[in-house]
Protein backbone atom coordinates (compact mmCIF):
# COMPACT_ATOMS: atom_id res chain seq x y z
CA UNK A 1 0.00 0.00 0.00
CA UNK A 2 0.98 3.64 -0.27
CA UNK A 3 1.36 4.98 3.27
CA UNK A 4 2.29 8.47 4.46
CA UNK A 5 3.51 9.29 7.96
CA UNK A 6 2.97 12.88 9.07
CA UNK A 7 5.78 13.73 11.48
CA UNK A 8 9.29 12.31 11.35
CA UNK A 9 10.08 12.18 15.04
CA UNK A 10 11.54 9.08 16.66
CA UNK A 11 8.27 7.13 16.87
CA UNK A 12 6.97 8.30 13.50
CA UNK A 13 10.22 7.27 11.80
CA UNK A 14 10.40 3.95 13.65
CA UNK A 15 6.82 3.12 12.67
CA UNK A 16 7.57 4.22 9.12
CA UNK A 17 10.35 1.63 9.08
CA UNK A 18 7.88 -1.02 10.31
CA UNK A 19 5.50 -0.12 7.48
CA UNK A 20 8.33 -0.25 4.95
CA UNK A 21 9.55 -3.60 6.30
CA UNK A 22 5.98 -4.86 5.83
CA UNK A 23 6.29 -4.08 2.10
CA UNK A 24 4.51 -0.74 1.80
CA UNK A 25 5.74 2.33 -0.09
CA UNK A 26 6.26 4.85 2.72
CA UNK A 27 6.51 8.64 2.48
CA UNK A 28 7.54 10.61 5.55
CA UNK A 29 6.38 14.22 5.82
CA UNK A 30 8.39 16.66 7.92
CA UNK A 31 8.69 20.43 8.18
CA UNK A 32 12.45 20.37 8.79
CA UNK A 33 14.41 20.42 5.48
CA UNK A 34 17.38 18.64 7.04
CA UNK A 35 15.19 15.72 8.11
CA UNK A 36 13.51 15.50 4.70
CA UNK A 37 16.84 15.54 2.89
CA UNK A 38 18.37 13.03 5.29
CA UNK A 39 15.60 10.46 4.87
CA UNK A 40 15.17 11.05 1.12
CA UNK A 41 18.82 11.19 0.10
CA UNK A 42 20.76 9.28 2.78
CA UNK A 43 18.01 7.03 4.19
CA UNK A 44 18.92 8.29 7.63
CA UNK A 45 17.13 10.48 10.20
CA UNK A 46 20.16 11.82 12.04
CA UNK A 47 18.09 14.37 13.95
CA UNK A 48 15.33 12.21 15.46
CA UNK A 49 16.40 8.57 15.09
CA UNK A 50 20.18 8.41 14.69
CA UNK A 51 20.38 4.82 15.99
CA UNK A 52 19.07 3.51 12.65
CA UNK A 53 21.96 3.89 10.23
CA UNK A 54 20.07 2.95 7.09
CA UNK A 55 16.32 3.19 6.65
CA UNK A 56 14.62 0.90 4.08
CA UNK A 57 14.93 1.87 0.42
CA UNK A 58 11.12 2.01 0.08
CA UNK A 59 11.01 4.98 2.49
CA UNK A 60 11.29 8.52 1.19
CA UNK A 61 10.41 11.98 2.50
CA UNK A 62 8.95 15.31 1.45
CA UNK A 63 8.13 18.65 2.97
CA UNK A 64 5.28 19.27 0.52
CA UNK A 65 1.89 18.57 2.10
CA UNK A 66 -0.02 17.84 -1.11
CA UNK A 67 2.73 15.62 -2.48
CA UNK A 68 2.87 13.73 0.80
CA UNK A 69 -0.77 12.66 0.98
CA UNK A 70 -2.18 12.88 -2.55
CA UNK A 71 -1.86 9.13 -3.23
CA UNK A 72 -1.80 7.79 0.32
CA UNK A 73 -4.23 4.97 1.13
CA UNK A 74 -3.24 5.19 4.79
CA UNK A 75 -2.21 8.44 6.48
CA UNK A 76 -0.43 8.01 9.81
CA UNK A 77 -0.33 10.97 12.20
CA UNK A 78 2.72 11.17 14.47
CA UNK A 79 2.67 14.83 15.48
CA UNK A 80 3.02 16.20 19.03
CA UNK A 81 -0.48 15.92 20.50
CA UNK A 82 -0.78 19.56 21.56
CA UNK A 83 -0.04 20.74 17.99
CA UNK A 84 -2.07 18.11 16.13
CA UNK A 85 -5.17 20.19 15.47
CA UNK A 86 -3.43 23.14 13.84
CA UNK A 87 -1.16 20.86 11.80
CA UNK A 88 -3.95 18.60 10.54
CA UNK A 89 -6.27 21.40 9.49
CA UNK A 90 -3.81 22.19 6.68
CA UNK A 91 -4.02 18.59 5.45
CA UNK A 92 -7.84 18.35 5.57
CA UNK A 93 -8.50 19.30 1.92
CA UNK A 94 -5.56 17.23 0.64
CA UNK A 95 -6.20 13.75 2.05
CA UNK A 96 -8.03 11.27 -0.22
CA UNK A 97 -11.71 10.84 0.56
CA UNK A 98 -11.32 7.10 1.15
CA UNK A 99 -8.00 7.15 3.02
CA UNK A 100 -7.74 5.56 6.46
CA UNK A 101 -6.26 7.96 9.03
CA UNK A 102 -4.17 6.42 11.80
CA UNK A 103 -3.10 8.17 15.01
CA UNK A 104 0.09 7.25 16.86
CA UNK A 105 -0.39 10.18 19.24
CA UNK A 106 -0.85 9.73 22.98
CA UNK A 107 -2.32 12.69 24.80
CA UNK A 108 -5.30 14.79 25.75
CA UNK A 109 -5.67 18.19 24.10
CA UNK A 110 -5.04 20.62 26.91
CA UNK A 111 -7.21 23.46 25.57
CA UNK A 112 -10.32 21.29 25.08
CA UNK A 113 -9.81 18.15 27.18
CA UNK A 114 -10.52 16.04 24.08
CA UNK A 115 -8.94 12.73 23.14
CA UNK A 116 -6.83 12.48 19.99
CA UNK A 117 -9.55 10.59 18.10
CA UNK A 118 -11.86 13.56 18.66
CA UNK A 119 -9.16 16.08 17.72
CA UNK A 120 -8.15 14.27 14.52
CA UNK A 121 -11.70 13.76 13.30
CA UNK A 122 -12.63 17.40 13.97
CA UNK A 123 -9.44 18.81 12.43
CA UNK A 124 -10.00 16.76 9.26
CA UNK A 125 -13.45 18.23 8.76
CA UNK A 126 -15.56 15.52 10.36
CA UNK A 127 -13.64 12.39 9.41
CA UNK A 128 -16.03 9.41 9.70
CA UNK A 129 -15.39 7.19 12.72
CA UNK A 130 -14.97 4.11 10.52
CA UNK A 131 -11.96 5.74 8.82
CA UNK A 132 -10.17 6.65 12.07
CA UNK A 133 -7.70 4.21 13.64
CA UNK A 134 -5.78 4.51 16.92
CA UNK A 135 -2.57 2.58 17.57
CA UNK A 136 -1.14 2.17 21.06
CA UNK A 137 0.85 -0.36 23.04
CA UNK A 138 4.24 -1.06 24.65
CA UNK A 139 6.16 0.48 21.77
CA UNK A 140 9.31 2.31 22.87
CA UNK A 141 10.51 3.83 19.61
CA UNK A 142 14.19 2.88 19.87
CA UNK A 143 13.42 -0.77 20.56
CA UNK A 144 10.95 -0.94 17.65
CA UNK A 145 13.55 0.81 15.47
CA UNK A 146 16.06 -1.87 16.51
CA UNK A 147 13.52 -4.45 15.27
CA UNK A 148 13.13 -6.06 18.68
CA UNK A 149 9.98 -8.25 18.96
CA UNK A 150 7.02 -6.01 19.80
CA UNK A 151 3.24 -5.89 19.62
CA UNK A 152 0.60 -3.20 19.57
CA UNK A 153 -3.17 -2.66 19.45
CA UNK A 154 -5.01 -1.28 16.41
CA UNK A 155 -8.44 0.16 17.23
CA UNK A 156 -11.22 1.19 14.85
CA UNK A 157 -15.01 1.16 15.03
CA UNK A 158 -14.87 -0.70 11.70
CA UNK A 159 -12.98 -3.89 12.54
CA UNK A 160 -12.23 -4.51 8.86
CA UNK A 161 -10.31 -1.24 8.62
CA UNK A 162 -8.48 -2.16 11.83
CA UNK A 163 -7.44 -5.41 10.16
CA UNK A 164 -6.25 -3.54 7.05
CA UNK A 165 -3.95 -1.36 9.16
CA UNK A 166 -2.82 -4.33 11.28
CA UNK A 167 -1.82 -6.19 8.12
CA UNK A 168 -0.03 -3.12 6.80
CA UNK A 169 2.30 -3.10 9.81
CA UNK A 170 2.79 -6.86 10.22
CA UNK A 171 6.41 -7.99 10.10
CA UNK A 172 8.50 -10.81 11.54
CA UNK A 173 9.19 -8.68 14.61
CA UNK A 174 6.03 -6.56 14.92
CA UNK A 175 2.47 -7.81 15.40
CA UNK A 176 -0.79 -5.91 15.82
CA UNK A 177 -3.94 -7.04 17.59
CA UNK A 178 -7.28 -5.46 16.67
CA UNK A 179 -10.22 -4.08 18.66
CA UNK A 180 -13.20 -1.79 18.19
CA UNK A 181 -12.55 -0.07 21.54
CA UNK A 182 -11.13 3.20 20.26
CA UNK A 183 -11.93 5.10 23.47
CA UNK A 184 -10.17 2.53 25.65
CA UNK A 185 -7.03 2.44 23.52
CA UNK A 186 -6.91 6.24 23.36
CA UNK A 187 -7.31 6.61 27.12
CA UNK A 188 -4.70 3.96 27.91
CA UNK A 189 -2.15 5.62 25.68
CA UNK A 190 -2.75 9.06 27.14
CA UNK A 191 -3.26 8.42 30.84
CA UNK A 192 -0.36 6.02 31.37
CA UNK A 193 2.03 8.91 30.65
CA UNK A 194 0.86 10.60 33.86
CA UNK A 195 1.65 7.42 35.79
CA UNK A 196 5.08 7.26 34.14
CA UNK A 197 5.84 10.79 35.32
CA UNK A 198 5.07 9.77 38.91
CA UNK A 199 7.06 6.52 38.74
CA UNK A 200 10.02 8.31 37.18
CA UNK A 201 9.88 10.96 39.88
CA UNK A 202 9.89 8.32 42.62
CA UNK A 203 12.83 6.53 41.00
CA UNK A 204 14.74 9.78 40.57
CA UNK A 205 14.19 10.59 44.24
CA UNK A 206 15.65 7.24 45.26
CA UNK A 207 12.54 5.23 46.12
CA UNK A 208 12.47 1.52 45.33
CA UNK A 209 10.30 -1.29 44.01
CA UNK A 210 7.48 -1.07 46.55
CA UNK A 211 6.86 2.59 45.79
CA UNK A 212 7.05 2.11 42.03
CA UNK A 213 4.68 -0.87 42.14
CA UNK A 214 2.24 1.06 44.32
CA UNK A 215 2.17 4.01 41.92
CA UNK A 216 1.78 1.79 38.86
CA UNK A 217 -1.08 -0.30 40.24
CA UNK A 218 -2.97 2.63 41.72
CA UNK A 219 -2.39 4.52 38.50
CA UNK A 220 -3.82 1.61 36.51
CA UNK A 221 -6.87 1.54 38.77
CA UNK A 222 -7.32 5.28 38.24
CA UNK A 223 -7.14 5.19 34.46
CA UNK A 224 -9.39 2.10 34.35
CA UNK A 225 -12.00 3.94 36.42
CA UNK A 226 -11.82 6.89 34.04
CA UNK A 227 -12.14 4.52 31.09
CA UNK A 228 -15.17 2.79 32.56
CA UNK A 229 -16.84 6.16 33.15
CA UNK A 230 -16.13 7.07 29.51
CA UNK A 231 -17.71 3.77 28.34
CA UNK A 232 -14.46 2.07 27.35
CA UNK A 233 -14.12 -1.73 27.62
CA UNK A 234 -12.50 -2.83 30.88
CA UNK A 235 -10.52 -5.63 29.19
CA UNK A 236 -8.59 -3.05 27.15
CA UNK A 237 -6.90 -1.81 30.31
CA UNK A 238 -5.66 -5.32 31.13
CA UNK A 239 -4.06 -5.85 27.72
CA UNK A 240 -1.20 -4.52 25.62
CA UNK A 241 -2.57 -0.98 25.41
CA UNK A 242 -3.13 -0.82 29.16
CA UNK A 243 -0.91 -2.94 31.42
CA UNK A 244 1.57 -3.61 28.60
CA UNK A 245 2.20 0.02 27.79
CA UNK A 246 2.24 0.92 31.48
CA UNK A 247 5.00 -1.62 32.18
CA UNK A 248 7.14 -0.41 29.26
CA UNK A 249 6.66 3.30 29.91
CA UNK A 250 7.13 3.13 33.67
CA UNK A 251 10.15 0.85 33.56
CA UNK A 252 12.51 2.30 30.98
CA UNK A 253 14.71 5.40 30.72
CA UNK A 254 13.85 5.27 26.99
CA UNK A 255 10.46 6.68 27.98
CA UNK A 256 10.42 10.48 27.77
CA UNK A 257 7.77 10.70 30.48
CA UNK A 258 9.71 8.44 32.86
CA UNK A 259 12.89 10.44 32.23
CA UNK A 260 11.11 13.77 32.72
CA UNK A 261 9.72 12.52 36.03
CA UNK A 262 13.12 11.19 37.10
CA UNK A 263 14.65 14.61 36.53
CA UNK A 264 11.94 16.15 38.72
CA UNK A 265 12.73 13.57 41.38
CA UNK A 266 16.41 14.52 41.27
CA UNK A 267 15.43 18.07 42.17
CA UNK A 268 15.04 19.79 38.81
CA UNK A 269 12.26 22.29 38.30
CA UNK A 270 9.69 21.73 35.55
CA UNK A 271 11.50 24.35 33.45
CA UNK A 272 14.88 22.67 33.95
CA UNK A 273 13.49 19.22 33.18
CA UNK A 274 11.85 20.58 30.02
CA UNK A 275 15.15 21.99 28.77
CA UNK A 276 17.03 18.70 29.14
CA UNK A 277 14.23 16.48 27.82
CA UNK A 278 14.90 14.75 24.52
CA UNK A 279 11.55 15.30 22.84
CA UNK A 280 8.05 15.98 24.10
CA UNK A 281 6.90 14.46 27.41
CA UNK A 282 3.20 14.30 26.59
CA UNK A 283 2.32 13.47 30.20
CA UNK A 284 3.06 17.04 31.27
CA UNK A 285 0.19 18.79 29.45
CA UNK A 286 -1.97 15.66 29.80
CA UNK A 287 -1.88 15.69 33.61
CA UNK A 288 -4.04 18.77 34.04
CA UNK A 289 -6.41 17.52 31.35
CA UNK A 290 -6.83 14.21 33.20
CA UNK A 291 -7.73 16.02 36.42
CA UNK A 292 -10.36 18.02 34.55
CA UNK A 293 -11.59 14.86 32.84
CA UNK A 294 -11.99 13.14 36.20
CA UNK A 295 -13.97 16.07 37.55
CA UNK A 296 -16.24 16.00 34.52
CA UNK A 297 -16.81 12.24 34.76
CA UNK A 298 -17.22 12.21 38.53
CA UNK A 299 -14.11 10.03 39.02
CA UNK A 300 -11.52 10.73 41.71
CA UNK A 301 -7.98 11.10 40.33
CA UNK A 302 -5.62 11.20 43.34
CA UNK A 303 -2.48 10.32 41.36
CA UNK A 304 -3.11 12.76 38.52
CA UNK A 305 -4.07 15.43 41.05
CA UNK A 306 -0.89 14.88 43.04
CA UNK A 307 1.24 15.04 39.88
CA UNK A 308 -0.59 18.17 38.78
CA UNK A 309 0.38 19.75 42.11
CA UNK A 310 3.99 18.83 41.33
CA UNK A 311 3.82 20.50 37.93
CA UNK A 312 1.78 23.53 38.96
CA UNK A 313 2.86 24.13 42.57
CA UNK A 314 6.32 22.59 42.70
CA UNK A 315 5.61 19.79 45.20
CA UNK A 316 8.55 17.53 46.01
CA UNK A 317 8.37 13.78 45.47
CA UNK A 318 7.89 13.24 49.20
CA UNK A 319 4.99 15.68 49.21
CA UNK A 320 3.50 14.07 46.10
CA UNK A 321 3.58 10.64 47.72
CA UNK A 322 2.03 12.06 50.89
CA UNK A 323 -0.82 13.43 48.77
CA UNK A 324 -1.28 10.01 47.19
CA UNK A 325 -1.30 8.11 50.50
CA UNK A 326 -3.47 10.41 52.60
CA UNK A 327 -7.20 9.97 53.06
CA UNK A 328 -9.58 7.50 54.65
CA UNK A 329 -9.31 3.72 54.39
CA UNK A 330 -11.24 2.44 51.36
CA UNK A 331 -11.73 -0.85 49.54
CA UNK A 332 -9.27 -1.49 46.74
Image (cartoon, helix red, strand yellow):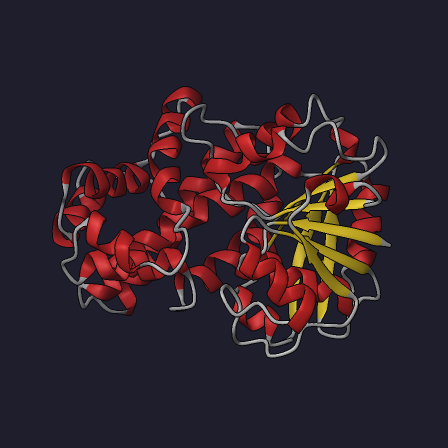
**Of the pair 322 and 194, the residue shown nearer to us:** 194
Front in this rendered view, residue 35 or 78? 35
Determine which quarter of the picture holds residue 172.
bottom right
- Please indicate whether residue 264 sits to the left or right of residue 157 in the image: left
Q: Residue at x 58, y 56 (%)?
A: 8
- Residue shown at the point (83%, 61%) measured from the top left: 24
- Tell me where residue 61 appears, x and y as whole percent: 69, 57
Q: Residue at x 39, y 53 (%)?
A: 217
Question: How far from the left and from the top, in percent, is residue 226?
Answer: 46, 33
Q: Nearer the viewer, residue 35 or 151?
A: 35
Image location (x, y in percent) of residue 214: 31, 56
Q: Where is residue 35 shown, x and y percent of the image?
A: 57, 60
- Whether 231 is drawn above or below 238: the answer is above
Which quadrant would residue 110 be assigned to in this image?
A: top left
User: In the image, is residue 105 above or below residue 149?
Assistant: above
Residue 163: in sight, yes or no? yes
Residue at 60% x, 51% y is 30
In-image side of 247 versus 21 (left or right):
left
Location of the C terminus by quadrant is top left
Q: Is residue 138 visible?
A: no
Residue 302, above or below 6: above
Which quarter of the figure is the N terminus placed in?
Answer: bottom right
Amino acid sequence: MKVTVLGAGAWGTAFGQVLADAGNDVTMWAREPEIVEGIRDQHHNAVRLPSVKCLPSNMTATGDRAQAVSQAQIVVVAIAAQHAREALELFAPLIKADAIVVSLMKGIERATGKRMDEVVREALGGLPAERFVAISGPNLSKEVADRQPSATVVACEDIDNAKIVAQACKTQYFKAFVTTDVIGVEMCGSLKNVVALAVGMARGAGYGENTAAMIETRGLAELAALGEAAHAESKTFQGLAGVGDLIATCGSPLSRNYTFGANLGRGMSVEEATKVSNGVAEGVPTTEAVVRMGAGLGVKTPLASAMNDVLERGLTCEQMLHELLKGNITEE
